[in-house]
Image (spheres, helix red, strand yellow):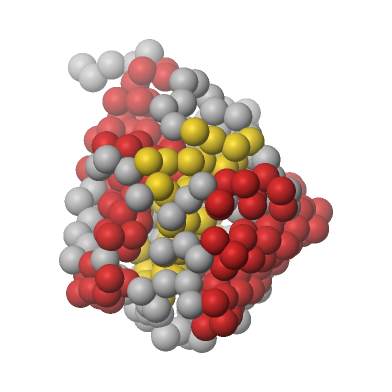
Amino acid sequence: MKVLVTGCFGRVGGKVCAELLAKGYDVIGLDVSPPKGPCDHEYVQAPLEDTDAVGFAVEKADAVIHLGAFMSWFEQDAPKVFSANVTGTFHLLQAAARKKVQKLLFASTGDVYPESSAVYLPVDEHHPRRPTSVYGMTKLLGEEMVWFHARKYGIPSVVLRFSHTQDAAELLDPDSFFSGARFFLRGKIRQMRKFGNAKALALLESHDDGTEKLLLSRGEDGTPYRMPICDTRDLVQGVLLALESEKAVGETMAIGPEEAISFDEAIRLMHEITGLPVVDVRLPGPAVHYHTSIAKAKELLRFRPRWSFADMLKEAAVAWRERTGRHEE
């Protein structure tokens, strides 16, 4: 089987391609960006909106793993998010219907609920979908387009709703796209400045003296933030299991870690590793505080996450020491 992986040079896509090759699959990739180094598989460099390039890539494939997307929560990026995630996905699905691919996997997200404003916990696949971001809205539309094409053209399809996912080494990187704004004061300041959140920005800036600090985020009532953080390798395992399982066809499943991590515990562990001072801030509004059920993936796919947050931090500690030149005493 030859598998097309969109977003093939991304955090998840690169590892999915490597695992597919290791298991003996042929791989063709599609990505708007070039590879960062040597590439072991055929690929097409083009945006999802390029119908000719997408059609060319799909025509070579027996199955499609659609990971490619434009991810942003900034209002100024809304047209780009819609173009890639809705228009681009539509063109991909049309090409998959023409080719009559054997299987199609679509990467969705908990932002379709959204998890940060959950109606009940744990969040599961039956939770109401009422996205509050453009990104979440485009992924909801993507899910509906997948099921339309499955019904109309008979494409065996699977929707996977990914938990928040990171490489372990990113967790202690202040410049990480995700962890910088999640766990570091100055990264959060940069994010709030882009969002134009003046109230949160004023609170955060009052703690900034120009040095790096860890940030313990709480809601305004003092509740610490809490959320699942999935190791990329576990997510990749879920994707491969879904590709190879007949039971997955026609299903929507959450893929993520066993447990959520409370930020007070996360920051305590990070402080022990880095020695950085901790700023404890009550941000405006309720805390982002949720956990997600992966019971369905565990039952249907026999999915078993292997990397806990503590396991990820052990690898992050090594990367931190290499980056900063600090060593254990």
**34 on left or right of 294:** right
Q: Nearer the viewer, residue 187 or 42?
A: 42
Is residue 168 among the parts visible in the rendering?
Answer: no
The image position of residue 92, as x and y in percent, is 62, 59
Using the image as rendered, state which of residue 41 and residue 1 is in the foreground: 1
**Rendered view: 24 above or below 120:** above
* Residue sitting at x 42%, y 85%: 126
Q: Residue 80, percent across and down?
A: 76, 53
Quadrant occupied by the C terminus: top left
Residue in front for this viewpoint, 233 or 246: 246
Residue 77 visible, this angle = yes
Picture layout, residue 315 above or below residue 192? above
Residue 46 on image: x %, y % = 67, 40
In the picture, measured across the screen, residue 89 lies left or right of residue 271, that is right
Q: How many marks?
A: 0
Q: Residue at x 32, y 63 (%)?
A: 242
* Residue at 37% across, 41% down: 26
